[in-house]
Image (cartoon, helix red, strand yellow):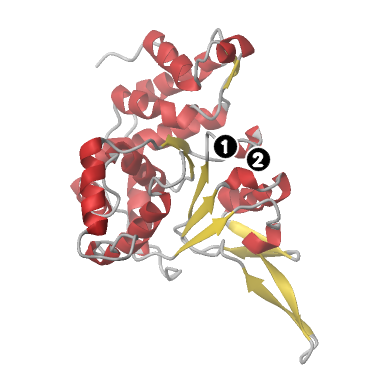
Amino acid sequence: MTDATTPPLPVSGDALAVRADAVREEVSKAFIGQPEVLDQILIALLVGGHVLIEGVPGLGKTLLVRALAQALQLDYARVQFTPDLMPSDVSGHAMYDPKTETFSIRRGPIFTNLLLADEINRAPAKTQSSLLEVMQEGQVTIEGRSFPLEPPFMAMATQNPIEQEGTYPLPEAQLDRFLLKVLIDYPELEAEKRMVDAITTGRSASDFDLSQVRQVLTGQDVIAMQQGVARVTVDPAVIDYAVRIVAASRRWPGIAMGAGPRGSIALVRAARAQAVLRGRDFVTPDDVREIALPALRHRIMLAPELQIEGQTPDDALRALLAKVEAPRK
């Protein structure tokens, strides 16, 4: 993990975009195809948020985390959530040493920079909740003692949208803690060809060779970038636009439960990072519109009649975005 030393100076201007492009280029060497997924992960990282990734197994979610950790010189850990997983298996626990007759704290895998919580909905609610404190407050409580995590920290939880038997759906309160919900689908044909060629040519192993992913930043650089992104200019008219989008979700026909104020905050935070990835130091209404689906799809609940018709939250949000007037340039 990174050293908790003097906070680095924030990065701003063109340097933000240059650094973000460097990370994107390196991670793309391993995570081939689906650039929008990588961009959304980088957006969450740049604003210190967390991501819920929904997709079938075998699409490279673990590879993405490993490549990102290598490009940024960060620690990563992967936890496979199962029905018998206990909260202490994630956060850690106190161990009794009979020789010294004292208790010592054994830290769990959550003490890292990038945490992949694989198939989080396979574990019961008490285990899922082990992530709530660290996602919201950046600390872990073990046996009544609080242990702050060294930044940067990002949790990436995955769930399979197909196999729902024996799963425990995440409660709305926990879904709301995720900055974005990213949908990852099968790669396009050409991207899959490049992926197969890279993994099978001259190699007997089935894993990707990460040696080609160069380290381009450090954890301290990431913190400096997060501080810089927080200073990206957002015009009051753009903030008003983001809030009106979220407010419209609360009264939109077919949406039984709209997004709360945390949705408005997430939308503006993510739009700042979206602007950086587009090479700008100011947010436009297009930035808000482009990131609205990942920022809001997990914060709304469709009415039963729309679910019966086979519509998705994205369908409702697209219709909503088409009706909410954007500020004029």
Quarter of the image where one finds residue 290: top left
Depth check, mark 1 against mark 2: the one in front is 1
Q: Position of residue 16 (x, y in %)?
A: 25, 48
| Residue 138 visible at all | yes
The residue carrying pointer 2 sits among few (fewer than 14), some (14 to 19) or many (20 or more) residues within 10 Å by Cα, namely: some
The residue carrying pointer 1 sits among few (fewer than 14), some (14 to 19) or many (20 or more) residues within 10 Å by Cα, namely: few
> Dot 2: what SS?
loop
Tag 1: amino acid = Glu
Quarter of the image where one finds residue 323: top left
The residue identified by callout 2 is 167
22 lies above or below 247:
below
Q: Is residue 141 left or right of residue 267?
A: right
The residue identified by callout 1 is 163
Q: Quadrant of the N terminus?
A: bottom left
Q: Are marks 1 and 2 in contact (CB under 8 Å)?
A: yes
Name the residue rendered at 61%, 43% in the picture: 121
Q: Nearer the viewer, residue 168 or 175?
A: 168
Name the residue rendered at 29%, 66% in the picture: 204
Name the residue rendered at 58%, 20% in the picture: 258
